[in-house]
Image (cartoon, helix red, strand yellow):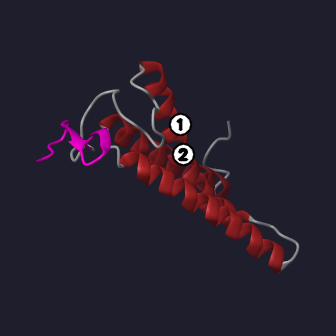
Amino acid sequence: MIMTPGSMYSGGGMNMMNAMHQSFFWGKNVTILFKGWPDNNLGMYVLALVFVFFLAFSIEILSVTAAVNRATTPAVGALTQTGVYALRIALAYLVMLSIMSFNLGVFIVVVAGHAFGYFAVKFRALRQSAPDTIPKV
């Protein structure tokens, strides 16, 4: 039996299952990270998009957090930076798995999350490096 996107397959003792999307699509009927989430519910879809946005945003913020570490000993500093790095990589893999849903809404909020996170990091760095030229709010 040939499976096409959106078709169902039943046979060989397997339960009915949906084929995964192989191209970008638009809509709230998507599974993001966990089975049954957002469960074809618009409110849960928006919540999932907000969650994925903050995952991407956090990756950018954590990319500079380890560099700002002021540990008392090299061992504590290395352990702290390793922990932050492991958390950042775990979040990056969650974002990658979210994008693999091929949903355009997820793709857009991931790019926006990374962009806003990068902006926040760079704005803070520029603000600290040139305090006389940029007014503090």
**Taking 128 as reference, is 18 above or below it?**
above
Q: In this rendering, would 106 be left or right of 88?
A: left
Marks 1/2 in contact by CB < 8 Å: the verdict is yes
Q: Find the magenta span and give its range.
A: 1-19
Residue depicted at x 45% and y 38%: 35
**Taking 137 as reference, is 130 above or below it?**
below
Query: Picture coordinates of residue 83 (x, y %)?
Result: 70, 65
Depth order, front residue of 49/124: 49
Query: Picture coordinates of residue 109 (x, y %)?
Result: 42, 38
Q: Amino acid at mark 1?
A: Phe
Residue depicted at x 88% and y 72%: 72
Residue for badge 1 = 51
Give the number of marks: 2
Q: Amino acid at mark 2?
A: Leu
Residue for badge 2 = 55
Q: Is residue 11 magenta?
A: yes
Residue placed furthest toward the right: 72
Query: Picture coordinates of residue 22 (x, y %)?
Result: 22, 47
Residue placed furthest toward the front: 13
Depth order, front residue of 85/63: 85
User: What kind of element bears circle 2?
Assistant: helix
Residue 16's image quarter?
Answer: top left
Q: Is residue 16 magenta?
A: yes
The image quadrant where one finds the C terminus is top right
10 Å neighbourhood of mark 2: few (<14), some, or many (≥20)? Answer: many
Q: CA distance from mark 1 to mark 2?
A: 6 Å
